[in-house]
Amino acid sequence: MRFSKSNDVLGTTNRGNAAESSLCTLCRADCQGKCETWLSSMVGRKLLYPRSFGIVTAGANNTTHVGVSYNSLRIQGYAYGAQGLNKGLTNDPDDCIFPNVNLETEFGNEIKTKARIPLMTGALGSTFVATKYWDSFAIGGALCGIPVVIGENVVGVDRKSKIGKAKIKKGKIKSAPELERRIDGYLRYYDGYGAIIVQLNVEDTRNGVAEFVVNKYGNKCIIELKWGQGAKDIGGEIQVTSLDYALFLKNRGYVVDPDPILPQVQKAFKEGAIKSFARHSRLGGTNLDSVDQVQEDFMNSVEYLRKIGFKRVTLKTGSYGMTELAMAIKFASDAKCDLLTIDGSGGGTGMSPWNMMQSWGVPSINLHSKANEYASILAAKGEKVVDMSFAGGFALEDSIFKGIALGAPYTKLICMGRGIMVPGFVGSNIEGALHPDRRKKLSGHWDKLPKTVSSIGNSAEEIFASYFDVEKKVGKKEMKNIPYGAIAFCTLADKLACGLQQLMAGARKFSLDQIERTDLFSGNRETARETGIPHVSDVNDETAKKILNS
């Protein structure tokens, strides 16, 4: 593994075990620091460099790559050339500087959706974490100009939503306060870059979420069909500690485990033997027995969503095997979907069963490598391939570059789940500590600033490197409405963007559409075999020998 528990060069430490992404395997909202993502949420691009400048020298410690993972891919650098410069710029060294790298991207079939940086959030659905910190995630994403995804079951678990028994075509949902809060929170700061995407699962489809969204918001929202995710091979879960709430969810039509209706379960809960209930979603596609049936069902679903008014439709799929991957790419392309998000195993932002996360599905690098291979087969036949987003264990700027390069030219975005949620936690805790009257509303966990934060500063203006960038964008008066979690979000995004610009400039690629698979090489032979990315010693070896023999 590339990441150890502590990084002396950056002055960062993981509270728990470090995952492939660099995040702790268990990320806590009340954490007092200080992994790289946590600290980047405050100091931003400063964390791109070794600490204690002027009295240290630093060297990399990851010269040997073992096993197959994104960390076993390395990024090419070149000593000459410049590709993809914006209009008005030349290949003069004064123009070929990393701040001039253009990170804007777009995706879509007929209607193009723009993003300022090639990121989108993972699906933030019915988990209580998503509910508590939504303003930080949504406002931060809108200010950065990236798509934010509202995940499954938001309406179904909302006790204030009103779902009637009328036919869906007539409008089944009478009100959905939490869903509306989430959409409105993003749209308030939306400026033409990014998008708000609403996801559908089995229960959402039954409840008429799509009809409600299109009737109220029209095409301000993108609708997303969900096949699965990289954390689990069953439907989504949340955990509740109230018998009354468990019964409410059961009556709403969800699978609740253990079953709160059973007298023995209620007695066990009353006596304290059972302390919580897990609410589960249903598996999709259980009434389909063949590829042809899946295709017909999918095409009908997309056609229906367009018929009721959606002009942009996307698909999210999980780390299933190669058959399902091929179906997702082929069907999404045939249906002229606007985006396909492919989520590899290992990730998860909700309450996925731990050993399921550890043991099921296709790891991200294998899944994404095959996605590129399958997309290339369609392209070679002259078919237009759906734009893609890769998800599953991304947190740092180098992994963003690698994901886009591995899937090039089809990958337009990297979908980041846990990594982009951390600043929401950090900012909310800081705001709650500095303003105790806001702590409960913000779900802040700190009574005072820990030393890991107070060593940086004692006010928002001191702590967040991007504070005044946000202030310039929204205006000084509006800053009172911007949660610190959103400022932290923008600070982390600025660090990721700057780091990506630097890597791209080194590869002599000054716009995202210039990134290619040839900008990568594999650190070991096994990774080369699995990804099709040549080994470091083989890349350009023939060209090198021609130079020597000329």
Image (cartoon, grey):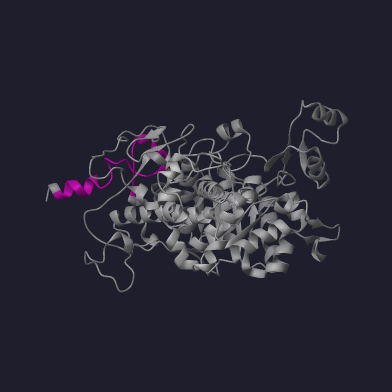
Image quadrant holding the N terminus, namely top left
- Does residue 62 appear to the left or right of 471 in the view shown? left
Q: Is residue 516 visible?
A: no
Q: Please, which residue is most extreme toward the bottom here?
A: 88
- Does residue 497 appear to the left or right of 484 in the view shown? left
Q: Position of residue 514 (x, y in %)?
A: 36, 60
Q: Please, which residue is most extreme toward the right here?
A: 263
**Eyeballing the image, is 446 above or below 106?**
above
Q: Position of residue 178 (x, y in %)?
A: 70, 56
Q: Position of residue 193 (x, y in %)?
A: 51, 66
Q: Position of residue 530 (x, y in %)?
A: 42, 39
Q: Please, which residue is most extreme toward the left here?
A: 550
Q: Quadrant of residue 289?
A: top right
Say which residue appears at 57% left-offset and 62% top-offset: 481
Q: Nearer the viewer, residue 338 or 419?
A: 419
Q: Specify the segment rendered in magenta.
A: 520-547
**Eyeballing the image, is 89 above or below 99?**
below
Verify whether residue 316 appears in magenta: no
Verify whether residue 545 appears in magenta: yes
Q: Is residue 66 visible?
A: yes
Give the number of callouts.
0
